Image (spheres, rainbow, N blue to C red):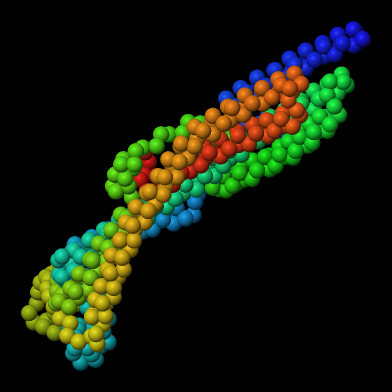
Amino acid sequence: MAVDRMFITTTGIQILASLLTLCLAAGSARAQHLNLIAPAVQPAGAERNAASTAPAPLTLTLHDALERAEQNDATFLSAVTDAELAREDRAQARATLLPAVGLRSEFLNTQGNGRIPTGRFVTNDGVHVYREWSVVHQDLSPSALTQITYRRSMATEAVARAREEIARRGLAVTVTRAYYALVDAERKYSTAQQAFEQAQHFLTISQDLERGGEVAHSDVIKFRLQANDAERGFEEARLAMESARLGLAVLLFRDFNQNFNVVDDLDLSPPLPSFSDVQAMAGRQNPDVRAALEALRAASFEVSAARQAFLPSFSLDLDYGIEANAIALRSVDSGNRELGPVPNLGYFLTATATLPVWDWGMLRSKLKQARLRRQLAQAQLSAAERQLLSNLYAFYGEAATARRELDTLRQSADLAAESLRLNTLRYQAGEATVLEVVDAQNTLTLARNAYDDGAVRYRVALANLQTLTGSF
């Protein structure tokens, strides 16, 4: 009996040492999450060949991910294209304010009548007429003199630029959510792997204690059930991590590359500014309000242009060159050959005035349309301002709540690790049941996952808030 007790005591000491080592590892494992992915089973030669030919995976930060997404996202690229088109429209509108210069070359071949040299058409003074002109055209309409069209194009470009910024900030939220979803999935994979290893270790310990007669077989059954649950959780975490990687790859790579890693900076959460600072930034840098304001300006210019359509418009055309029977500075006129060579080079000026008199109500209809668009733009601006205030309070409240809860979640994860360590010691001493140990294990896994979810929630809340304020 003395030998048996000595054997049991020695076994208990060894098991206690193993439990202490396991608990200390569980307590310190939270300091850093490992991106562990179980490799597929391959022959040794195939692994060496794959390692020698496969390129090194990319390591992406959130900033890198945002830059790549801006190069690939169709919605954002559409907004960028619209802004560039609006810039070209502004350049074209500005060009209409300046004189247009062009060259014109014509050859008029008139059928002769056999009797006089001017041919059959009274508008021509010869069978062959050549026109070589340089033409200068200037529009003197009221819209050109007041630059209404150009100013409206500037406002339209500003609307397009604001919408481009809206698309950029919306894409930043999408990428941030997908990026940290992958980080969160990798952390949960690491946590699930640790939980599975702990469950296997506890199962081994319980089996050793059962053989020593220190615990009942029911403890072994409970730890076996716990190990089975941990294994299923581990497989689910692997699947979730792979799905998150696919979701981010769609946003970042045109060739659907999955050979990349992300930097885990989830614990380095930026601070949240005060509400007064956030409110001031939203007032200065909100693209939704800026887009609505510029749209109202464009609608007002459209009303002015519709009013000016009732006024007279003027234009000037200056033509300089030759119109003669030969391409020469001096030539003989076909109808007046007795005069000899006469000068061909000269100019003529055409001034045109257009006054609308009757158009069956078309101009009034266009003016009414412009006024209706301006009314709608005013309503949209008011709605954008109200929506900004609503979103500002909602997004800031979400970010502030997530930030406050983050400290509590971190404390809960640390306490759960300590609880598992203490319950392990109590179980070894016979003061705790197997249910308490299993519950401590589950609590630790849930607490770690809750902390990771809370950190992701705070990052996404910041990204949503920055859609209103810009980066801070």
Left or right relative to 118: residue 234 = right
Location of the N terminus (image quadrant): top right
Q: Quadrant of residue 211?
A: top right
The total of numbered circles placed on residues is 0
Could you say which is closer to the camera, residue 23 or residue 132?
Answer: 23
Q: Is residue 154 above or below residue 316?
A: above
Could you say which is closer to the camera, residue 435 or residue 244?
Answer: 435
Location of the C terminus (image quadrant): top left
Left or right relative to 315: residue 436 = right
Q: Residue 339: x and y, percent?
A: 7, 79
Residue at the location (60% across, 34% down)?
447
Q: Residue 365: x and y, percent?
A: 26, 80
Could you say which is closer to the camera, residue 103 or residue 358?
Answer: 358
Q: Is residue 311 above or below residue 79?
A: below
Residue at the location (17% across, 78% down)?
310
Q: Is residue 416 above or below residue 338?
A: above
The answer to whether any part of residue 148 appears in the image is yes
Residue furthest to the left in view is 339
Q: Quadrant of residue 223?
A: top right
The answer to whether any part of residue 260 appears in the image is no
Could you say which is closer to the camera, residue 411 or residue 244?
Answer: 411
Left or right relative to 114: residue 60 = right
Q: Residue 258: x and y, percent?
A: 62, 41
Residue at the location (80% across, 33% down)?
222
Q: Residue 405: x and y, percent?
A: 49, 37
Residue furthest to the front in view is 431
